[in-house]
Image (cartoon, rainbow, N blue to C red):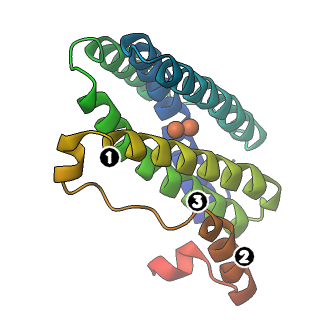
Amino acid sequence: MPETESCKNLIALLQLAYSAEQAAAYAYRGHWHSVVDVEERARIKQIEDEEWHHRELVGGILEKLGAHPNKQREIRSWLLGRALGFLCHLMGWFAPMYGAGRLESRNIREYETAARYARDCGHEEFTDCLLTMAEVEWEHEYYFRSRVLLHFFGRSLTLWPAPPPKETIRESFAREAEGGFTLVEAAS
Ligand SMILES: [Fe+2]
Ligand SMILES: [Fe+2]
């Protein structure tokens, strides 16, 4: 049972991430099937596999925290992922690459925040795993951004804000730990 605000926030965020990974994985399954380029297919297939792995890891953390995935979110994310995967076959090359990049940038922040909640509620044993997932999401964002920028339309658009360099994920986390910073205190 969650004892602190940070623990409740961690569980809620992980339930969200657990289902979001399912939606992402199914969407990428449709995505890699829809692209023609062999290297793009292989990389997006690898990203699908990484999302399934994240889901496994997040599920494991939830279990250790005595929590479970949210059933309604699970149903919604299944439907959403399947729908997006199907739409990838109709939307052409650019829109799925753009949408994926935008979503991935949010995933980086989600796992960084989850790592902070874990630290704040005394579950330091999960922080390395959560920060590693943030780093993998950073790689995903970088890949889709690079794809979008290959396209003349992508170069003429203002893209979502670029995340800071990958190293800053761990650097800022370590800096905050030294300064005794907590998310709950920062919000109050
Ligand atoms: Fe993921
Ligand atoms: Fe991802």
In the foreground, 110 or 35: 35
Q: Amino acid at mark 2?
A: Ala
Helix, strand, or loop for circle 1? loop
Nearest-to-viewer mark from 1 and 2: 1
Tell me where residue 81 sits by quadrant: top left
- Residue at image position (58%, 59%) is 112
Q: Residues under labels 1 and 2: Cα distance?
A: 32 Å
Q: Amino acid at mark 3?
A: Glu
Contact flag, marks 2 and 3 (Cβ < 8 Å): no
Earlier residue among tags 1 and 2: 1
Residue wearing tag 3: 112
Residue 11 in the image: above or below residue 99: below
In the foreground, 127 or 140: 140
Residue 155 in the image: above or below residue 186: above
Tell me residue 135's x, y (percent): 63, 52
Earlier residue among tags 1 and 3: 3
Residue 118 in the image: above or below residue 64: below
Earlier residue among tags 2 and 3: 3
Q: Which mark is residue 149?
A: 1
Tell me residue 26's x, y (percent): 46, 18
Classify mark 3 as within 8 Å of ligand 1 or not, answering yes or no: no
Tell me residue 172's x, y (percent): 63, 75
User: Does 84 sit left or right of 67 as displayed?
Assistant: left
Can the viewer see residue 75?
yes
Q: Which mark is residue 174?
A: 2
Classify mark 1 as within 8 Å of ligand 2 or not, answering yes or no: no
Q: Residues under labels 2 and 3: Cα distance?
A: 12 Å
- Residue at image position (48%, 40%) is 16
Tell me where residue 178 sits by quadrant: bottom right
